[in-house]
Image (tube, rainbow, N blue to C red):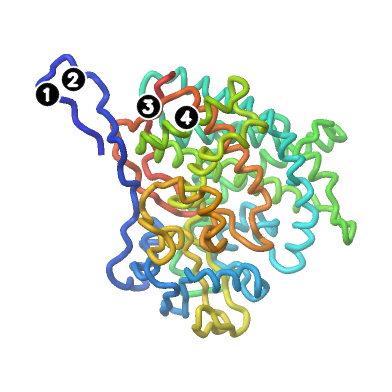
Amino acid sequence: MIAPADDSAPDMLDTPPETPKKAMPPHVAPPGRPLSLFETVRASRRNVLEIIPALSYRQPMVSGRLGARWHMVQDPGALARIFLENIDNYPKAEVMIRMLRPAVGNSLFTSDGEAWRWQRRTVAPVFAQRNVVALAPLMTATAERAAARLARQSAAAEMVSEMLSATFDVICEVALSGREHFDAETYGRAIVRYFETVGKASLLDFLQMPDWMPRPGALLGRGSVRTMHAMVASAIAARRDEGGSGADDLLDHMLQAEDPESGRRMSPTELLHNMQFFIVAGHETTALALAWSLMLLAMDRDAQDRARAEAQAALSGPAAGADDLGAMPYVRQAIEEAMRLYPPVGLVARTARTPDVLAGREVRPKDTIFIPIYALHRHEMWWESPNDFDPGRFAPAAAEARDRFLYLPFGAGPRVCVGANFAMMQAQIILATLLARFRFSLGDQPLPVPTMLMTLRPEGGVWLRAEPL
């Protein structure tokens, strides 16, 4: 993907190779035939995207049997039924809950029914738009620190780690008013270790064995859970001892939050699990969206130049702020297109409780319903040139004309991500600040393969050169 140096010009041998004007984003080729049970288990432990059949990119629904009946759903009407019209019939599949419960318990993300409803009612006001906008100065300060770190790099930098550091700064300031109780590197290693152990499906999951049967990954991941929980618990305990910080951060809001209908407040365990979820989800997914966005812009010089010109014209200071975002629609479109090609979570699963019909097909109780968001976002029926990077897809007129259930980076319906506005504001502020200060080009390393365990990461990282302007 990178043009080689010209051997006939010795004085140019040390010059970094030039990035092509536009290159094709990396993509996981689907299997060419149905996979056996053991092939499916191996593939899912290596990269969940490898189990999505080729038909899922061309048909509205694909069904099969692998121990139990399953359906992969890519039809917008069927997705509306799952996420909105008949939501209580499609709780999260037990395999997903098993992977998440050790870290986040019965939190907002993993609970269903009334347990979910009261937590959602309690937490939603914390992420009201006015509260998110009030946090923008913290995001701006973090964007400036991220730019300063990149300016000190003399060679290609790995963007996933750079963006994780930036978004971890934000979530620590927003959630806990600082990193006093967190070692970012230790916490980050624990997250990765968790994904690589607890976050991998096992043969027992595909055979639908009871949850009480121990999975090897759960045993191997206990240390990472202890590490993460200890840091979060320490921060909560310190705040309780202080009687509140007066910092108006997420933890203060969560300590005071109560369900407006029942008056119920979170128990210490519920508070720990929800704070753990917000800290992990609040920086991991945004960092990945930023790393993918930077890679795609580095691969498309025209798109990067357009986004940079927009950011430079809009910024009222050295770094972007909330007031600048309205003047940068193309920067937002680039992030949205990056999340189309590389959604933070590429596949989710539900289990049908009662009989239903989806896309004209019978669904029986206990059928597994897969929503392959990665395939939905690259579906040949719904997207023109689906594997190309084109931020114009998210221009207002194009987005308005598209069915809303064809683009699901944050989910949909009542369970849409409660922190979606927070994530998008954070991503726009950081990306605009970096684009205004640097020109990004590909490093010498191969383009990364999108690989999903629990989140969709670039295997090997995203290596880019950041040339100060």
Verify CB contact (< 8 Å) between mark 1 and mark 2: yes
Verify CB contact (< 8 Å) between mark 2 and mark 4: no
Residue positioned most to the right:
263
Q: Nearer the viewer, residue 34 or 307?
A: 307
Q: Label 4 to label 3, Cα distance in Å? A: 16 Å
Q: Label 1 to label 2, Cα distance in Å? A: 7 Å
Instruction: Indicate which label's residue lies in the foreground, 2 or 4.
Output: 4
Lower position in the chain sequence, tag 2 or tag 4: 2
Q: Position of residue 323 (x, y in %)?
A: 67, 31
Please determine whether, in this image, residue 75 is positioned above or below residue 454.
below
**Mark 3 — residue?**
465
Q: Position of residue 412 (x, y in %)?
A: 61, 61
Assign a secondary structure to mark 4. helix
Name which residue type carries label 1: Asp
Lower position in the chain sequence, tag 4 or tag 3: 4
Please determine whether, in this image, residue 187 is positioned above or below residue 433.
below
Q: Residues within 10 Å of mark 2 (few under 14, many from 20)?
A: few
User: Quadrant of the rendered structure where residue 62 is?
Assistant: bottom left
Label drawn at residue 7: 1
| Quarter the C terminus occupies | top left
Name which residue type carries label 2: Leu
Q: Position of residue 456 (x, y in %)?
A: 46, 50
At 59% from the left edge and 33% from the top edge, which residue is drawn? 429
**Mark 4 — residue?**
308
Name which residue type carries label 4: Arg
Please determine whether, in this image, residue 34 is positioned above or below residue 181.
below
Assign a secondary structure to mark 1. loop
Instruction: Indicate which label's residue lies in the foreground, 4 or 1.
Output: 4
